[in-house]
Amino acid sequence: MDLGPHLFLALLEGLVGAFVLALTALGLSLVFGVMRIVNVAHGTFFMLGAVVTWYVSTLTGSFLVALLAAPLAVGAVAILADRLVLRPIGYEPESTIVATIGLLYILEQVVLMTYGPYARPVAAPIYFRVDFPWFGYSGYKLVVAAVAGVLLVLAWLALWRTTLGLHLRATQQDREMAQAFAVPVERVYTLAFGLGGGLTALAGALIVPVQQAHYLMGLDALLMSFVVVILGGLGSLRGTVVAALVVGLSDGAVSVLFSPTLAKIVATLLVGLVLAVRGRGLFGEESA
Amino acid sequence: MSHNGDGAVGLSRRRFLTAGAAVALGAGLPGPRVPRADAQAGSGPLRLGFQVHRTGIGAVYGRWYERTTTAAVKLINEKGGIAGRPVEIVAEDDGTDPKRGAEVVEKLATQHKVDLIFGTLFSHVVIGSAPRAGQLKIPYLVVSEGYHVASGRLNRYVFQPGITDVRAQVTAVAPWILKNLGKKATLIFPDYAFGHDHRDFFSRVATAQGGTIRALVPIPPTETSFTKYFPRVPADTEVLYHVMVGPGVLTFVKEMGEHFAARRPQIFGFVDSLEGVDLASPGLDFLEGTYFWEAFPRYAGAGTPAHVRTYRERVGVNDVGASVNDPRDVSTFSHMFGCWETLHVIKAAVEKSGYKKPGPADYKALIETLEGFQSFAEGIEHPQGPKRFVGRLHQVFGQQVISRVQKRRLEVVHRTAVEDSMYPPEADYTKQPL
């Protein structure tokens, strides 16, 4: 294939990857920003979203119903986890890490026991193949990128144009002050955790027709979310989106033009570089 | 973060990194320990250690290996067990992880004190576990397909008597591919031992027979998206040779279809790319008319022999290769028969050698008996077909099947002879000390 079409494919792959990654990492970033905790079970919520999508779309025959059900169900699981696990340990950072690792294993094994080890497919709701002169491309992937883009805009609107968003941002900036101004901080915590899980589940649901639901799929999502959130700056949503674009596009370009392994090396180096030169990430808040 | 004071961001980042490290560590932790089994010696049940991929990327295979094993043991016990002793399976999960695999071998040998160990599939796990079996001097019968046994790189305690190796498979089918599909081939394979066997032996056999390898496309084993690899397939490729394993297989085949569609070259795949996957899955339409290697035809038809029907019934597989209890639960049909056949080889070897209990003398007799086997006849004990066994290689040879996808089913178009897969031996385990 010539360089032109090659680059074009790289760009396509990169963009699709970037949008899904941004949506996946947004939840992690939100949870960290608002609650100051690291949710290691984040990737598991992504996987749960995919698995719920498979169950619901197989039962009802409708992918759209599944797309609605997945974030709701996983959001509910996240809220339960917040109430039953995180709140009792007082959101203490180190304990939270251990607790969410536990959550990761419990959820993963429950899925293995019930759903099984299979990578199960879901038919794409809209299936068409875009036939470029040099190669074909999945039309559904482009739809996924577009939907993820719309969801990102909606998330941004929700954060900046609603009372709920105001509460989230207030809690993020200064928890005690927010409480003093009658922001229901406890409820905001629960909501943030539920929302984080739900958003990630939505990304998982969108990706099932491309990737299949598999009980181990959360690990990669977790890793890439970490990369993006560190790169973008902890707690900065804008940073998350920008970093996802950087990582996604460089991953697409490097892996198409050179090798996917090199792409992962580049992403890791990028994180190392950012940590060394600009420790708070591209858009991280100033400390103190 | 204004109220957090100095260094808050730094601390948070460290916390982030710690979490990542903790996850990495956690992934390597062994599962829960089971109580130590009572030692036994020479009487009572024959205890066979079963190293199984219950979790990790090999879990689909592991599940079916376990079902096949259970069915084979049930049959053996119904017929009076092995040397009059009932067979008991002691299964241990290795997480499809080489390091844990070695631990499992050790645990089965020293804690459970099993008579021998069998059942490992994924080649990196076999390569990680086999040296431990050699050190512990316990027979270790793998059901893995890799060339690692016949290559001579393992040790005298390792056998593969129930499934043929990649080199044999490739040797048998390559001439057919070159003759019928094309001479300019591009290979897509997983970038580790099993895939390297395909790369090396197909390249070797094909170039020796007038074919050319246009490109080699290795894919990292954990890859989830494949579109980016297909541009590396040169336009003048006549036949695309693919073999993939793991949870990404369906994505791989789908994205291959999206990329090439009607412009596709001839496609020959190893059914490993679709084990555990329903051929009627959405997105697989484009496979229509492509070819697959199978070890054992997944779809039963009018010509299916009685002993194969019995085997399918016993294991619980319907005519399209899925579980009789759940049609969505598709088997790994071209691999799992290896457990069934291995157990019957164990039966033959134990009975012939007079093996009684773990120990150097009995193991010596057992191993030499195994090495002395020449052939296994087709039948309920070896449903896949007749086999030849090469003692110095510790490897069995059998027929290979080439099938074509027709109406979303695999229909057999060619069956090779056992001899087609034989290659000049490179190793001789019988010269190694016990």
Image: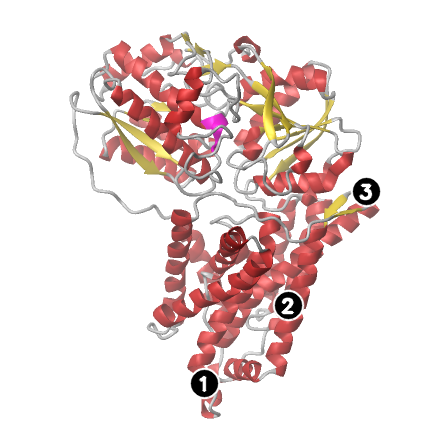
Along the horizontal axis of the image, is B287 left or right of B385? right
**What is the three-letter code of the residue carrying label 1?**
Pro
Which quadrant would residue B387 be assigned to in this image? top left
Q: Is residue B54 above or below residue B76?
A: below
Q: Residue at x 49, y 74 (%)?
A: A192
Instruction: Return the residue at label 1.
Output: A184
Instruction: Return the residue at label 2.
Output: A151
Mark 1 → mark 3, Cα distance in angstroms: 56 Å
Instruction: Return the residue at label 3.
Output: A134
Q: Residue A32 appears at what percent x and percent y?
A: 50, 71
Host chain of mark 3: A
Residue projecting furthest to the bottom: A181
Which quadrant would residue B395 be assigned to in this image? top left
Mark 2 → mark 3, Cα distance in angstroms: 31 Å
Secondary structure, mark 3, is loop
Q: Residue at x 64, y 69 (%)?
A: A152
Sequence-first tag of 2 and 3: 3
Q: Which range is magenta? A: B331-335
Q: Is residue B332 magenta?
A: yes
Q: Residue B430 appears at what percent x and percent y?
A: 39, 11
**What is the three-letter code of the residue carrying label 2?**
Leu
Q: Residue B363 appears at what percent x and percent y?
A: 27, 17
Host chain of mark 1: A
